[in-house]
Image (cartoon, grey):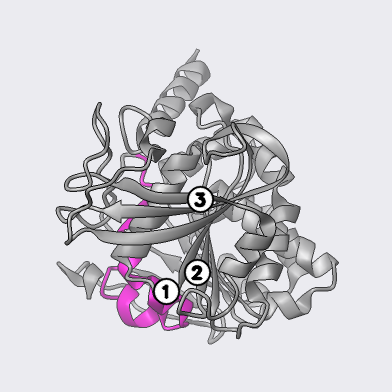
Amino acid sequence: MKSSIFAASAFLILSIGLTGCGTRPGPEVLETVSAVPDDAKQVRVYAVTTRNRINPDSNVFDAGKATAPNYAELTVSIPPTHKPSQIEWPKGRKANPAKDFAVTGQAVLSEAAFREAIHPGKAGSNRVGIFVHGYNYNFQESLFRLAQISHDARLDGTPILFSWPSQAAVAGYVADKESATYSRDYLAALMTEAVAGRSDKDVMVFGHSMGGWLVVEALRQLKLQGRDDVLAKLNVVLAAPDIDEDVFRTQMAVIGKMKNPMTILVSGDDRALAVSRLISASSNRVGTLNVNDPKVQQAAVASGVTLIDISQVEPSDSAHHNRFVDLVGLYPSLAAGTEDKGLRKAGAFVFDAAGATISSPFRIVSGALNQ
């Protein structure tokens, strides 16, 4: 009886904490709107998805597994009244660009058109950022989240969404794991395409939660394919990765130390990952590792990863799973390998595997996240 009550409570935490909104946004939020205010900001996002496209001439996708990736280009308008880390969803009406996130332009792309669009120099910057969402996301949620991150972090480069076929349902955890695994070869192919003609500072891959599992699986796949040339150009950041710690150790044993050390954001009080551990009946999740544990530090050094404990950052969700959203202003420093400069101000606790050192924890400084 106690276990069933705990499981029910766990799923309740997931349902409240992971989606961030009471009513899930449907495909209607992808309808193109016009009359955009002059002071609204426009973010162009390219999407690669292993989801099924509902109709050949639309960018509406379901949770089915596509037999080949689908490609899209969407422009998302950020309202002038936008608050950092938030997504202002339309509420029971057509999106109003003066108050809501809204799609103001879009196109269905072929693979060739996508490749041409992200070719170095085409978008005015050689830099690209690939975002891989986590469990319980639909396409539109992941699209708007990447637009929000790109805007709030003032990212210089082209944002690319890799959206895998999550069921977007609390009870879909097992199905989501299968869908993420299904998508790893396609993500590896995207990474290979993204680094072409770029330097080892131009490509950032950001995986959240189960998306972190997918990212590491794709890295492992590249290693097994002998693509060290691709791995050497990737800058990888994992936020609250939903990966069994023993599985991660074996993954990294194959991947080896990367030229650009992988950065992992962890938090011991992540309730969603605690539920994940319960559901899978497995070991600790990587996203909850204790940075102070000597064994964890030793493993980090062996794998060449940088661990950053962000537990002191005030959570914006009840599951304590989305703290990365509140740290978007520090993404450029993560990509540049200068995590220490801003993260300590935000209350982070950094274990630098490259230097085998630990920075002292700092209290959260009001307003420091946007500095």
Foreground of the two, 226 or 347: 226
Q: Which residue is mark 2?
A: 307
From where the camera sits, is residue 242 visible? no
Binning the other alpha carbons within 10 Å of mark 1 as few (below 14), some (14 to 19) or many (20 upward) gives many
Is 333 part of what is drawn in magenta? yes
Q: Secondary structure at mark 1?
A: strand
Magenta stretch bounds: 319-347
Disc ID at residue 107: 3
Q: Secondary structure at mark 2?
A: strand
Give the mark, 1 or 3, whose residue is nearer the N terminus.
3
Figure check: 40 above or below 360 = above
Q: Residue visible at 46% across and 26% down?
A: 11
Q: Can residue 271 be seen by looking at this rendering?
A: yes
Are the residues tagged 2 and 3 within 8 Å (C-beta)?
no
Give the main secondary structure of the magenta stretch: helix
Give the spatial CA distance, label 1 vs label 3.
42 Å
Is the C-beta separation of discs 2 and 1 under 8 Å? yes
Horizontal side of 370 relative to 158 (left or right) equals left
- The disc labelled 3 sits on which kind of residue? Ala
**Badge nearest the viewer, 2 or 3:** 3
Graded by Cα atoms within 10 Å as few (under 14), some (14 to 19) or many (20 or more), the crowding at tag 3 reads some
User: Relative to 340, is 306 on the left or the right?
Assistant: right
- Residue drawn at x 77%, y 66% as measured from the top left: 222
Q: Which mark is residue 156?
A: none
